[in-house]
């Protein structure tokens, strides 16, 4: 059985992420979607529990996909699951530049774990978590960009379409 991991913050999960998950699930026997518990490079809008729940709901019909939380190096998370591959989604050229650097670092740490890139489908290639958060904060409709529970949560956080933080929408 060949296992792959698909790590990310998923703040929040988008239909672009779901596209990559579905396609990777068709390639590997088991796909573990790894949610970074406490990312160092950004402060998530959604709690860890929300991010995990959104993902579990989004992949519930995929029998070979699991969701797990991690706080160690990606390669150590991969080893914990005995994964042979790390799946990364690519949308634009700037994604490639960042992922190329990460690939070289991961390859140095774990030459036995391969990175596999999945190009975003054209209909979701423009969707990013940060873009979705900004649209929602200004009252825009994100229904076609994220799974329904995520869109519903955005409507709760920003009922009047006011920009700001979810804790204080009038910031």
Image (cartoon, rainbow, N blue to C red):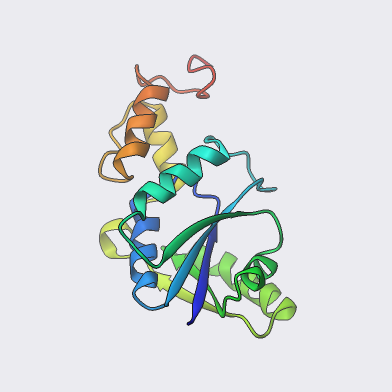
Q: Can you give x and y, in whole percent of width and height, for residue 19 in the image?
A: 33, 61
What is the quadrant of residue 70 in the picture? bottom right
Q: Nearer the viewer, residue 121 or 1?
A: 1
Q: Nearer the viewer, residue 123 or 55?
A: 55
Q: Residue furthest top?
A: 170
Q: Residue at x 39, y 63 (%)?
A: 21
Q: Nearer the viewer, residue 152 or 107?
A: 152
Q: Residue at x 36, y 21 (%)?
A: 161
| 111 sits left or right of 135 in the view | right
| 149 sits left or right of 144 in the view | right
Q: Can you give x and y, in whole percent of width and height, for residue 114 in the image?
A: 57, 81
Q: In which quadrant is the C terminus drawn?
A: top right
Q: Residue at x 30, y 65 (%)?
A: 121
Above or below: residue 166 compared with residue 124: above
What is the quadrant of residue 143 in the picture? top left
Residue 48 in view here: yes
Above or below: residue 73 compared with residue 157: below
Q: Can you give x and y, in whole percent of width and height, for residue 133 in the image?
A: 43, 37
Q: Can you give x and y, in whole percent of width and height, for residue 150 in the image?
A: 37, 38
Q: Residue at x 33, y 62 (%)?
A: 62
Residue 126 in view here: no
Q: Nearer the viewer, residue 60 or 14?
A: 60
Q: Residue furthest right?
A: 109
Above or below: residue 7 compared with residue 96: above
| 115 sits left or right of 15 in the view | right
């Amino acid at each position: 059985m060949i296992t792959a991991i698909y790590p990310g913050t998923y703040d929040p999960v988008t239909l672009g992420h779901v596209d990559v998950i579905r396609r990777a699930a068709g390639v590997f026997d088991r796909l573990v979607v790894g949610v970074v518990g406490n990312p160092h490079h950004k402060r998530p809008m959604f709690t860890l529990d929300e991010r995990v729940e959104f993902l579990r709901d989004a992949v519930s019909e995929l029998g070979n996909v699991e969701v797990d939380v991690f706080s160690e190096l990606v390669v150590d998370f991969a080893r914990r699951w005995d994964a042979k591959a790390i799946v990364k989604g690519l949308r634009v050229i700037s994604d490639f530049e960042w992922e190329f650097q990460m690939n070289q670092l991961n390859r140095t740490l774990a030459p036995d774990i391969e990175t596999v890139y999945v190009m975003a489908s054209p209909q979701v290639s423009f969707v990013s978590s940060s873009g979705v958060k900004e649209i929602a904060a200004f009252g825009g409709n994100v229904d076609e960009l994220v799974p329904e529970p995520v869109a519903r949560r955005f409507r709760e956080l920003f009922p009047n379409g006011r920009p700001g933080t979810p804790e204080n929408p009038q910031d």
